Amino acid sequence: MTKLPAALAMRAIPLRGAWSSTARPADFGIRLAAALAVAVSVGAGQLSQSSTEPGDAGASGRSEAGPAGGTQAAAVLPEGMIGVYTGAPYTYSSDVHVVKPGEHDFTAKDVSWVGRPFVDPIYYGVRLSRWAGGGNFAGMLDFTHSKAIAPLDQEVQFEGKAGGVDVPERGKLSELFRRLEFSHGHNMLTLNGLVALPRPHSRVRPYLGLGAGVSLPHSEVHLAQDPQRSYEYQYAGPTVQALFGFEFQTPRVSYFIEYKFTSAWNEAFLTHRDGSWLFVDLWLQAMRWWNGEAAPGGTVRTTLVSHQIIGGVALRISSR
């Protein structure tokens, strides 16, 4: 078994509080770097063991002793993976449509979004996957925490009416919004199917994937004419994603880099409330829907289409 260097083990202990929203960026960076160093140390140790462990027949299989004392290849067993990752998104500009019957019906055209992936709360993701079919096919549950923030000083084109009055043809976004963002974050939960591509090396697995799921953003919207903001987690609509990546395998740990393309059709509800926890906010939203209650401030609709480059590490769990 590979032992962690004492210095790295000691650095890994403070990571428990690194995800706090009050942690200083410098402290967070040190802790994240320590965690990555531990992961690299574990992976390097496992890789060095792969050439000396007698029972290891490669990244995705194993060998067994034959009746004459030799070895024979065994079938590739199903394998689970638990992974975490970080990365950076680029989100296309999109139209933002605000509707409140009898009061608002206007559109802000080509609103630009920024991601700020390394500013707290950072871009991150968590995934669970299981490879079967000889390691050629997998199912994966993928949660992505991204961000989409509309800078209010940008100048855009407007159409429609706000407060029953025609909006200006062009102006700064701050003329109609005090806040417009999905920054805690632009969350997406998807169920994906993966297929492995021909391997360029025994320990490198390229793969493609497609998935669909739900958009669960933390909607932070405050209209300029509205006395109250809406600040809560919501189910906002469906989302889809396509991905392509490379997995670099050691006997117990894999590292991966990946490109993801996502599209989320968001409809944020202006509820005039400050939310608390994800599941509490979703439960209250379901109860409002069940009771037929309309959002008092109306709705905000937009489609967030993003390119994302990610990198991460995954623990591999064999069925043997």
Image (cartoon, helix red, strand yellow):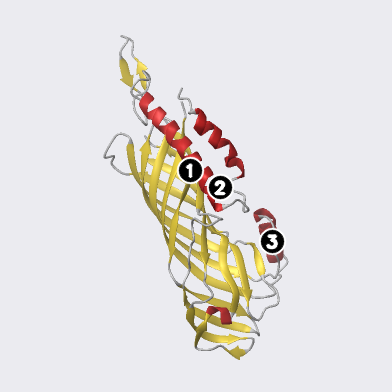
- Residues under labels 3 and 2: Cα distance? 28 Å
Cα–Cα gap, marks 1 and 2: 10 Å
Question: Which label lies toward us, 1 or 2?
Answer: 2
Q: From the image, tell me which residue sits under label 2.
A: 27
Residue corresponding to mark 3: 275
Q: Can you give x and y, in whole percent of width and height, for residue 197 in the image?
A: 31, 44
Viewer can see residue 83? no
Q: Residue furthest left?
A: 200
Left or right of 254 in this view: 108: right
Image marks 1 and 2: residues in contact by CB distance under 8 Å = no
* The label number, if any, that marks residue 33 in the structure image: 1
Q: Residues within 10 Å of mark 3 (few under 14, many from 20)?
A: some
Mark positioned earlier in the residue sequence (1 or 3): 1
- The residue at 41%/37% (across/down) is 254
Can residue 51 be seen here? Answer: yes
Q: Secondary structure at mark 1?
A: helix
Numbered disc 3: secondary structure: loop
Does 52 sit left or right of 139 as displayed?
Answer: left
Residue at left 59%, top 48%? Answer: 19
Say whether marks 1 and 3 touch (CB < 8 Å): no
Q: CA distance from mark 1 to mark 3?
A: 32 Å
Q: Residue at x 60, y 50 (%)?
A: 23
Residue 178 horizontal/vertical position (percent): 61, 75
Quadrant assignment, res 270: bottom right
Q: Amino acid at mark 3?
A: Gly
Amino acid type assigned to the residue bearing label 1 in the image: Ala
Q: Nearer the viewer, mark 1 or mark 3?
A: 1
Q: Compared to 166, does 20 lie above or below?
A: above
Sequence-earlier tag: 1 or 2: 2
Residue toward you, 272 or 123: 123
Question: Residue pushed farthest bottom?
Answer: 166
Q: Nearer the viewer, mark 3 or mark 2?
A: 2
